[in-house]
Amino acid sequence: QSALTQPASVSGSPGQSITISCTGTSSDVGGYNYVSWYQQHPGKAPKLLISEVTNRPSGVSNRFSGSKSGNTASLTISGLQAEDEADYYCSSHTSSNTYVFGSGTKVTVL
Amino acid sequence: DVQLVESGGGLVQPGRSLRLSCATSGFTFGDYAINWVRQAPGKGLEWVSFIRSKVYGRRTESAASVKGRFTISRDDSKGIAYLQMNSLTTEDTAVYYCTRLRSSWADYWGQGTLVTVSS
């Protein structure tokens, strides 16, 4: 199972909105509404941001939102803040009843 | 509070074995699946293995990269999950995280334990 495809890096200025894409196939992203997103700051464990494509757990800022179209899922961060500078990973359930992560995206706040 | 604490990492020679533990608290362990995810130095996240709860037959699945070498298990009476890693190679060097698996997403993560495979 190959990693889902994410852009290596995305940047934006404070207050702007950015979108991170996560492209898979009909056997993973496109076939299930089980896409989740994680944020990881350097030296820290990942943190769940979004589950089931669009659901935000309690405590996660509403500046983070998820969506999906076909085989591509997306994470949008609105009102970009300095604290959003981190690595972001998508993940999906697969048709093999396993899981696959995306390649990861480094977000830089300019 | 939900907590997961990994232990058992360290330096091990290629070809040797290691067992990681994931001690949990703050939730009913037996009701949840447990996941292991790893991250090689400077690399991205890689899903390793999961074990479902008793209700789902404690079903396990593993990534192709570790199948036949790694075995996941759980002790519901102790609230601990394990990852037995055999025939280790340098490619297995990584921080290993255990996570609680809620449906198909990892909602809580441990702090990770570093496994270094080197001669």
Image (cartoon, coloured by chain):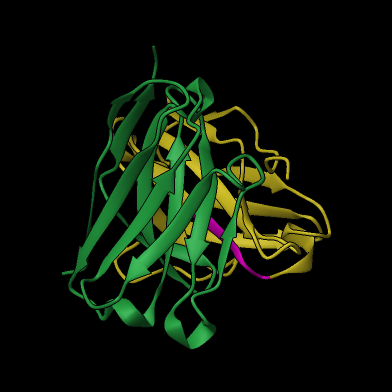
> Looking at the colours in the rendered structure, which chain would you say is drawn in yellow?
A
Given residues B85 and A26, the one toward you in this image is B85
Q: Position of residue A32 (x, y in %)?
A: 72, 69
The residue located at (45%, 57%) in the rendering is B72
Foreground residue among A10 and B118: B118
- Quadrant of the frame with the C terminus of chain B: top left
As drawn, the residue found furthest toward the top would be B119
The location of residue A90, given as percent across then percent down, is 57, 49
Rendered position, B41 above or below A52? above
- Examine the rendered structure and indicate whether residue A41 appears above or below residue B116: below
Tell me which residue sits at (33%, 36%) in the image.
A41
| Quadrant of res B76 | bottom left
Say which quadrant the N terminus of chain B sits in: bottom left
Displayed quadrant of residue B42 = top left
Any idea which chain is the green one in this picture? B
Where does residue A5 sit, x and y in percent of width and height? Answer: 70, 39
Is residue A4 inside the magenta stretch?
no
Which segment is the magenta one?
A33-37
